[in-house]
Image (cartoon, helix red, strand yellow):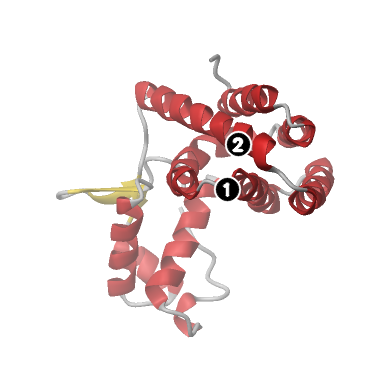
């Protein structure tokens, strides 16, 4: 399986190579292009990216610290896969924290922030209607980041960033088939935030996570 396109190798770029390799691999893991359990062979990645093995090795170590990659003796690196029990635990924690995030947003929002979120929502809904999975993933991240900005809790946002990355790879195959539903749910969350209905916003945000995981609370 070819993991990365060869048209534009990262070795020709000028930004720090390890950072570029991390970003390239993270994007493909979170989008589901490299599935859970897939081996990440340093020599293959080095050739395809047009870089030496050192930045690839460092990138894999960084992604391992984020929980996206697992490195095992004698087997090397692979995309982290989760047992059903681990999936349940991750979804439960993310749902709870997304609920808190939406609740705080409903309590603290202002007109400028709401206007920005409405623009994101409009663009996301448009892209969902035409079907653009890669761009939709980025828009989904923008929506949740904007909601976090309104919630204005830096500790919560730091925890959520890591947790969203770890669960994004679980949701990627499902999200390809529920793009418009995702954005309908985003719209409902934003309406509750605008109304200042903190409890409803929290409930809808929690439900959104369980729906994305196709799990019952």
Tell me where residue 105 appears, x and y as whole percent: 65, 39
Q: Mark 1: which secondary structure?
A: loop
Q: Would you place residue 185 above or below residue 48 in this image?
A: above
Q: Would you place residue 165 above or below residue 7 in this image?
A: above
* Residues tagged 1 and 2 counted as in contact (Cβ below 8 A): yes
Residue at 51 percent across and 54 percent down: it is: 28
Which residue is denoted by mark 1 in the rendering? 152
**Left or right, 129 with reference to 4:** right
Residue at 63 percent across and 29 percent down: it is: 205
Which residue is denoted by mark 2 in the rendering? 104
Q: Quadrant of residue 54?
A: bottom left
**Left or right, 23 with reference to 191:** left
**Left or right, 25 with reference to 52:** right
Tell me where residue 155 appears, x and y as whole percent: 44, 46
Tell me where residue 185 appears, x and y as whole percent: 73, 30
The answer to whether residue 176 of the structure is visible from this angle is no
Give the alpha-carbon distance from disc 1 to disc 2, as whole Å: 8 Å
Residue at 47 percent across and 27 percent down: it is: 91
Total numbered circles? 2
Label 1 Cα crowd, 10 Å radius (few <14 / some 14-19 / many 20+)? some
Q: Mark 2: which secondary structure?
A: helix
| Residue at the top extreme of this rendering | 216
């Amino acid at each position: 399986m070819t993991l990365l396109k060869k048209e534009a190798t990262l070795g020709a770029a000028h930004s720090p190579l390890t950072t570029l390799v991390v970003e390239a691999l993270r994007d493909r893991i979170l989008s589901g292009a490299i599935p859970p359990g897939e081996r990440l062979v340093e020599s293959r990645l080095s050739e395809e990216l047009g870089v030496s093995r050192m930045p690839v090795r460092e990138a894999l170590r960084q992604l391992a610290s984020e929980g996206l990659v697992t490195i095992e003796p004698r087997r090397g690196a692979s995309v982290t896969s989760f047992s059903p029990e681990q999936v349940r635990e991750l979804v439960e924690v993310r749902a709870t924290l997304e609920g808190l995030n939406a609740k705080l947003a409903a309590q603290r929002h202002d007109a400028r922030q709401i206007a920005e979120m409405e623009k994101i929502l409009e663009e996301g809904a448009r892209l969902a209607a035409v079907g653009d999975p890669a761009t939709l993933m980025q828009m989904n991240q923008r929506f949740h980041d904007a909601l976090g900005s309104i919630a204005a809790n830096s500790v919560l946002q730091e925890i959520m960033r890591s947790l969203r990355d770890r669960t994004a790879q679980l949701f990627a195959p499902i999200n390809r088939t529920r793009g418009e539903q995702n954005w309908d749910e985003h719209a409902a969350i934003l309406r509750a935030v605008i109304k200042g209905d903190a409890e409803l916003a929290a409930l809808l945000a929690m439900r959104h996570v369980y729906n994305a995981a196709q799990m019952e609370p």
